[in-house]
Amino acid sequence: MPDPTTDSTIDLDALAPRDLDTLRQGVIQIDGAGVIHRYNRAESVFSGRAPERVIGRNFFTEVAPCTHLPHFYGRFREGVRRGRFDRPFSFVYGFDPRPMQVRITLRHAAAPDRYWIITEPVEALEPGHRREAVQAAVTQRVRAEPVDPSLCEQEPIHIPGAIQPHAVLVAADVDTLTVTACSGNVRDALDRDPLGHDLAGLLGSDLTDRIRATLQGEGVDPGRTVRARVVLPSSLGLPVEAVAHRNGERIIVELELAPAHPEDFRAASQLDTELAIGRLRGAVTLEEAAAVAARETRALTGFDCILVYRFDPDWNGAAIAEDKDPAWTRSLLGLRFPASDIPAQARALYTRSKSRFVIDRDYVPVPLVATPATANAPVDLTFAQARSLSPIHLEYQRNLGVNGSMSVSILVEGRLWGLMIGHHRRPHYVAPETRAAATVLADAFAMRVYELESRRLWQEQQAHLALESELVRELARSDDFVSALTEQRHTLLDLFEARGAATVSHDSVRRLGQTPPSAAILEIADWLRMTVPLGSSSYVTAEFAVAHPPSAPYAECASGLLAAFVDAERHHLLLWFRPEVPSTVTWGGDPRKPVLAGSGPVAVLPRRSFERWVEERRGVSEPFAPWQVDIAEALALAVEGVVLRQRRKIAELTGLLADKERLLTQKDLLTREIDHRVKNSLQIVSAFLQMQRRQVTDPASQAAFAETAARVMSVARVHDSLYQAESVEEVDLGQTIENLCADLAGMAGEGHAVDLDAEPGLMVPYRKAVALSLIATELITNAFKYAFAESGGRVAVSVTGETEGRVRLSVCDDGQGLPDGWSDAPARGTGLGMKLIRAMLDQINARLEVENRPGACFTVTA
């Protein structure tokens, strides 16, 4: 029996199973499909898997899926096709806890469709300080309380100093194209140490010329790439995917063995991509588009699960669509994740570098080495596809139960809208063509999101702009902005899906719908005037009670607030209120514990629990959109024009009113002066008549002069009252009649007297006062003349107010009374007095009543 040896030429087919177990090398026999038929003890020791657990299973997809790469499985398939295998190659198994670098030899077995995989250990590898530190911190953690998540944001993830092992990286000076740094596994792709060499000698002149023409010179966009599929000497005729990009003063080239035949690995064709995009374009809602994108991306890439992950304004994330293997019971659909799960510097990296694929979470990072002159200048791997990930992130994937992963940025108008995330429970290789297809599909989804959201926003904005235009038209026709915005067919309440609205103008509040009370709104207005910076004209929040605790009692109607100042002085304000929307938010774990304290050199660790954690949210409204704030500010600007117009109108009217008051004052003074002069003139005329009366001897002439003087005096007394009154339109009738009675009693001579009972402050129009004064004069003088014959007597005069603005004037005497049939008897004297009385009665629409008591009593109601 031959002595087992490490010689790779040993005839494995001649060894019995127990002899295979004595070999130091790991030995596996598989068939052409990759199914395991033999598995020796050494391989079992390396992998930690018992033979009975793996025999009958597929080596490349079930037992060691980390080998399902062009570097391993691709070589195997190519050797099967050719009928021969090339020279051995190096490979690294990420065994836990000690990864191992091995030398792999592929050989044909004697039996048909049987092949040997011989694994010879080269050395046990350190997992890398950072990964080892994370693992140690996990096992040594003694604290579970949350720590400051901002510590995660301090990690320099763009300069990890290492790459993933499925690729090789070289970095060259941008001007000279001389290699200044490379990855430690460079011999997997190149036949020499590249440091100090020119790229042309390593990659060939064709590719180097393309790199020089595309990436050298000024104005080259960071991350711009040059792609080519080349065959390098060390690749043994297998294609190598080369991707070069520029970052600062370096040209970075990544080399990765590519599938020689598309059927060996899932590879998306152009037709697959076009059909997926076509189905995506058929989606008519955002939810439907997200579901189609998840389904089509999973069909292209083969991940166990694809999530469409959307960021909110605070950078919390939510899984809005999911397509997954039914056997994977964990679902993340509808869950929210705190912003610290994807910290700020990771989001910035996603914005600049659109895709990231991890084949095997447990990979051993390959460090970068550099020339002495550049050793202190870390290589920026922002745009490197094979950039090594943060060990904290890899631990996060481990806690989530994810091995292979994918993240492709969804950029809408240049802003990170979300991510297309792929999860696989085992290591998962995605071919370069498929990675590109997934990126194109994510871009197509981003464009569809933009189209759908833009259309929805456009329709909403058009409806609001139409309402705003109608309000502005009302404002243009009005000098009162409050009534224009609150009393027309459309009001402030119709804007922004608000349940309440209000205007504040100085200390006046006009409310519409469901709002806090007016006093509370005035307090809110004062708070806004003090809080909002002077350079800002608006304020918006969906959690008003947090910003303004006194408004907490009104959360049901005012959890959301949009306010816009109208004028620079902030006297006028427009407000819209939105009610509280009580809701439950389901988080993927407790958002209060986004990271945990680590130990040693690891400050923080990712959380380990992703169980559903339900949070009830109160005091929060539907948020106001930025475009709604713009419309509110525009409307406030339009209102400002009305307010300025009001100010100008008020100033104009104030000026006109002042002019009018001045003219009225002048008119009043002039009228009073006229009344005074008319009174004086009439008194002079009356005095002349009295003088003339004394100069004649004829009794009839004396009586005529006396009557005429009395009549002139009665008119003079009215003008005297007008002169003394506050108003030039009305006369105090009682005061006028009192003065008139005194004058008539004096003119009548001794023995004659007038008793007056006049209601004080009885104001009547000038025209009525003149008529009543003349009537009273005639009645009193007639009483003196006819009632008492030759002897004197007393006359009682009464002036009182009646309903509906009418007055009653009574002149009664206690004389001999009226003779029988007096109304039909001829007039005593000229009869002019009674004609004058009747004319005055008709002029003021008054009536006269006469009765004997004894004595005569005349009552005029006017």
Image: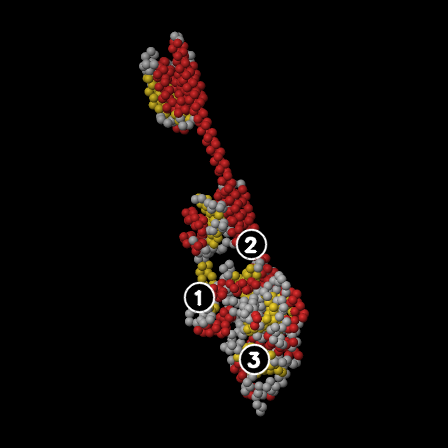
Residue 856, x across and y down, in percent? 35, 17
Q: Which mark is residue 221?
A: none
Labelled pair 1, 2 in contact (Cβ < 8 Å): no
Residue 857 higher or lower than 30, as above or below: above
State how far apart marks 3 and 2 are (Cα): 58 Å
Around disc 2, counting alpha carbons within 10 Å, would you say few (fewer than 14), some (14 to 19), or many (20 or more)?
some
Residue 478, x across and y down, in percent? 52, 41
Q: Which mark is residue 102?
A: 3
Q: Answer with mark 1 or mark 2, whichever residue precedes in sequence.
A: 1
Around disc 3, counting alpha carbons within 10 Å, would you say few (fewer than 14), some (14 to 19), or many (20 or more)?
many
Q: Secondary structure at mark 2?
A: helix
Labelled pair 1, 3 in contact (Cβ < 8 Å): no
- State the residue position of label 2: 457
> Is residue 841 shown to the viewer in this render?
no
Nearest the viewer among 152 and 190 is 190
Around disc 1, counting alpha carbons within 10 Å, would you say few (fewer than 14), some (14 to 19), or many (20 or more)?
some
Q: Which mark is residue 147?
A: 1
Give the amino acid at mark 3. Val
Give the amino acid at mark 1. Val
Name the outermost residue toward the front. Answer: 373
Quarter of the image where one finds residue 580: bottom left
Please state, as top left, top right, bottom left or bottom right, where the N terminus lies in the image: bottom right
Residue 199, x across and y down, in percent? 64, 71
Q: Answer with mark 3 or mark 2, whichever residue precedes in sequence.
A: 3
The colour scheme applied to this rendered structure is: secondary structure
State how far apart marks 1 and 2 are (Cα): 40 Å
Image mark count:
3
Nearest the viewer among 828 and 652 is 652
Residue at the location (51% across, 74% down)? 128
Nearest the viewer among 307 and 240 is 240
In the displayed structure image, the side of residue 483 where residue 720 appears, left or right: left
Residue 784 higher or lower than 368, as above or below: above
